[in-house]
């Protein structure tokens, strides 16, 4: 009886059937293994994605701000304010123009951040047996998505710029709260960038009010 089973198994038709079954099992096992490895890679991928997301968003803020500035839709954001003796007292700001620019920048960033895709690669050895095979094995590609909004406000700072000199800087602080989604996991992070609007060097004593809204 056993010999008959073996003959049928190793018969040419039986070999083909066995081969087809083995191939089917392999085709099923490979995707399941890949899904399982990617799921285990999620905790390792999140810190990588946070760093990638921060640099990507900072670059996006800078490029979007430069594009809006080159559009020619805005007037001068600020001008030098002079004292009666002709010395520079600081910056006089057109707050209405700055608010319009900030609103357009926030809206443009929200459009760009609607489902921004990210990806990174992690070695399989770091997922399976990190103590033995760290940094080895084939690469696993992990994908994530990024959603967020944006808000902006003006920030005025005074810094020492030299002997009896003060550097007055006016910047737009852009805050971008983000939701990072990686393999069903969510992470909240906030990216803050600053865009220079204007600056002036004040020589001598600093006046009480150096920024005037227009």
Image (spheres, rainbow, N blue to C red):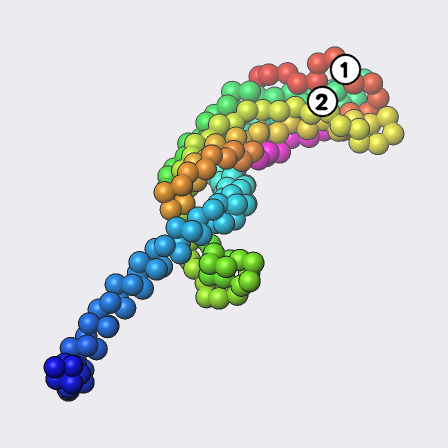
- Identify the mark at residue 90; answer none if there is no mark: 2
- Magenta-drawn stretch contains 22: no
From where the camera sits, is residue 8 visible?
Answer: no
Q: To which quarter of the image does residue 20 belong?
A: bottom left
Q: Which residue is the extreme one toward the top?
A: 208
Position of the N terminus, as image quadrant, is bottom left
Asked if residue 143 is positioned above or below residue 161 in the image, the reply reads below
Instruction: Report the residue at 53% width, 63% height from top.
Output: 133
Instruction: Report the residue at 46% width, 27% height from top.
Output: 103
Compare residues 32 and 45 and report the one nearer the observer.
Answer: 32
Please indicate whether residue 92 sits to the left or right of residue 96 in the image: right
Asked if residue 212 is positioned above or below residue 121 in the image, the reply reads above
**Image spot of residue 171 (x, y percent):** 62, 29
Callout 1: 10 Å neighbours few (<14), some, many (20+)?
few
Instruction: Report the residue at 30% width, 60% height from top.
Output: 31
Compare residues 165 and 122 and report the one nearer the observer.
Answer: 122
Magenta region: which residues? 193-200
The residue labelled by disc 1 is: 207
Magenta-colored segment: predominant secondary structure: strand
Compare residues 153 and 167 and report the one nearer the observer.
Answer: 153
Instruction: Report the residue at 76% width, 28% height from top.
Output: 159
């Amino acid at each position: 009886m056993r010999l008959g089973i073996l003959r049928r198994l190793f018969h040419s038709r039986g070999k083909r059937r066995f081969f087809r079954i083995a191939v089917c099992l392999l085709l099923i096992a490979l995707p399941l293994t890949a899904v399982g490895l990617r799921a285990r890679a999620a905790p390792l991928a999140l810190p990588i994605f946070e760093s990638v997301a921060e640099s990507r968003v900072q670059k996006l803020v800078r490029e979007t701000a430069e594009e809006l500035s080159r559009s020619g839709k805005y007037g001068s954001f600020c001008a030098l304010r002079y004292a009666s003796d002709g010395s520079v007292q600081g910056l006089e700001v057109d707050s209405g123009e700055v608010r319009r620019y900030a609103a357009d920048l926030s809206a443009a960033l929200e459009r760009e951040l609607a489902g921004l895709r990210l990806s990174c690669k992690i070695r399989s050895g770091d997922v399976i047996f990190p103590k033995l095979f760290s940094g080895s094995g084939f690469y696993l590609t992990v994908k994530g998505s990024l959603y967020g909004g944006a808000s902006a406000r003006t920030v005025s700072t005074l810094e020492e710029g030299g002997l009896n000199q003060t550097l007055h800087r006016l910047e737009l602080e852009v805050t971008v709260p983000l939701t990072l989604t990686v393999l069903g996991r969510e992470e909240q992070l906030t990216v803050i960038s600053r865009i220079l609007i204007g600056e002036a060097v004040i020589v001598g004593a600093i006046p009480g009010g150096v920024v005037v809204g227009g």
